[in-house]
Image: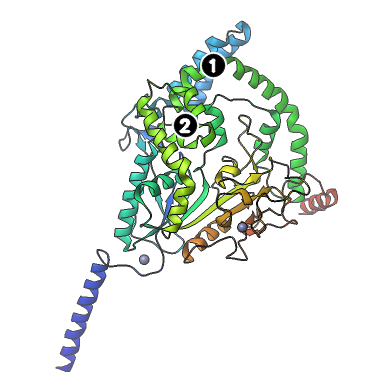
Amino acid sequence: MKKLLAVFLSVVIAFSLSLQIFAQTDDEKCDCGNIPVIFVTGFAYTELVANAGTPDEYGAFGVETEAITDMIKRLVLPLVELIFTGNYDKFAHKLSAEVNNLFYDASCDENGNPKNPTVDIEIYEPPSPYHYRNTKSTFRYDWRKDVFDIAAELNDYIEETKRLTGHDKVALRAESMGGAVTMAYLYTYGYDSVETVIMQSSAFDGIEMMTSLFVGDLSLDAKSVMNYVGNFLEGNSPEMVFYRALYNTLSMLVYHPVVKLLGGLIGNIEDVVYEDCIKSLFGYIPGIWVFVAEDSYEEAKAFMLDEEVNKELIKKIDKYHYEVMNRKEEIIEEAMANGVNFAIISNYGKAAVPLGDESKNQSDFLIDTKHTSFGATCAPYGENLGEGYEQKFDDGHNHLSPDNVIDASTCAFPEITWFVKDMMHTWYSDGYNEFAYTLIYTPGQETIHTYPQYPQFLLNNQQTEALEPLTKENSDTQSTDVDFIALLKLLIEKTEK
Ligand SMILES: [Zn+2]
Ligand SMILES: [Zn+2]
């Protein structure tokens, strides 16, 4: 009898437990301590496809190798003709027709609406109930859309994640364009559902390269091209220093004539190409306008768009620029006052895209450090701020980088802005991810003073993939001083093997 009772009781207990487990997935809160992390992706992170979801699906952003090589083949004859006739306009129209064709599926009409309605993102990752430590779910979107439409999708994603996980709040890792999306989200939907925001290589303050493109500044110079390609020669092993020195010496011999030739060609065809394709292809995509920096926005609008023809589009992009981008300091302050923990991680030590006047900026390979850091004063790429430089604002802390390249005292939020030297735009190393998750899982608002291992200035160690505090000693990562003895030793070692 006792045994039967025990069996009965255990069945009852098991049943009620299972009920509890069942209920937890629906209404009850989860107290696992691992906040769900949502990765808010950047521009073109997810491919666009035409005929999405059908067997006839194909890439819509025109970046498939075959399409590009076919186009180049078709341009060989017109180019030969150009050399003999000197008729730049004819060549420019031909080139524009090809580019228009290549990007047709991804392009928008004058109101900013997609021309091909079958185009969508290739992969959609739905919100997930799983939220193990150091993992994230990935929010993907059609980056051509008006940023407020994307923010609405992010809001749905966050609400569904909360429901599925049983957590009241989420953490956002916002990279690149995802930073602009996150700002539009915070502005529109408030701060209640978000515990932490990490802006990583964020485009919330624009990108100089896109600004140059949108104000018609396509100037090139050989040194900037050399630096940009040289971004890939990373590391300080004796071999790498030798390659870098060799590259810097010899590459200019190639780049000088090529850039001169290319510059001449661009100068002769740019007017036609802008009118025929650049304005309507890129200027008509609402999402791209988040990249235009604040102080050049009106100039870019006047250059790229027509007040009457593009009235609807201008309404959309103005809203982001005037209500979000120009007010981002206020929005971040308000978010923090409402309990959101904020961190801004900015990279430097890479040469900027060699387009326009600002191509000498300190950057992460794509976005300028002054923009991802929201206001740092940066020495031009390859230079420093000069001997005896003193930080602009003295708040009692040091905000000058050990290599004298960055003055963080001019940042909008110097106490919550970190810098990682030698990190490519969004090519996260293990050490970088570890840092981001440390910020997320530590309760409260961290600052550059919280952790001894994560001071304001960090180095992405190329060999170990770890982040380490930047020091005077480890900061010279672009050296071209070849250590011939070490190099010789290395060579001997290699031949012995
Ligand atoms: Zn949980
Ligand atoms: Zn300070």
Q: In this rendering, would 56 be left or right of 67?
A: left
- Local secondary structure at mark 2: loop
Q: On the picture, is 321 further left or further right than 392?
A: left
Q: Is residue 21 above or below residue 149?
A: below
Report the residue that reaches farthest toward the left.
Answer: 1
Q: Is residue 386 above or below residue 458?
A: above
What residue is drawn where x is 19% and y is 85%?
9
Identified by mark 2, the residue type is Glu
Visible residue check, residue 293 = no
Residue 240 appears at what percent x and percent y?
A: 73, 46
Q: Residues within 10 Å of mark 1 (few under 14, many from 20)?
A: some
From the viewer's side, name the closer residue of 6 and 261. 261
Q: Position of residue 305 (x, y in %)?
A: 44, 23
Residue 14 seen in this snapshot: yes
Confirm or reject: label 1 Cβ below 8 Å from ligand 2.
no
| Type of amino acid under label 1 | Asp
For the point 18% across and 80% down, which residue is it?
12
In front: mark 2 or mark 1? 1
Q: Nearer the viewer, residue 278 or 255?
A: 278
Which residue ends up furthest to the top in the rendered image? 85
Q: Quadrant of ligand 2?
A: bottom right
How packed mark 2 is, by other alpha carbons closer than 10 Å (few <14, some 14-19, many 20 or more), is few
The quadrant of the rendering that contains the N terminus is bottom left
Q: Quadrant of the C terminus?
A: bottom right
Residue receiving disc 1: 271
Q: Which residue is mark 2?
A: 64
Upstream in the sequence, badge 2 or badge 1? 2
Q: Is residue 345 above or below residue 123?
A: below
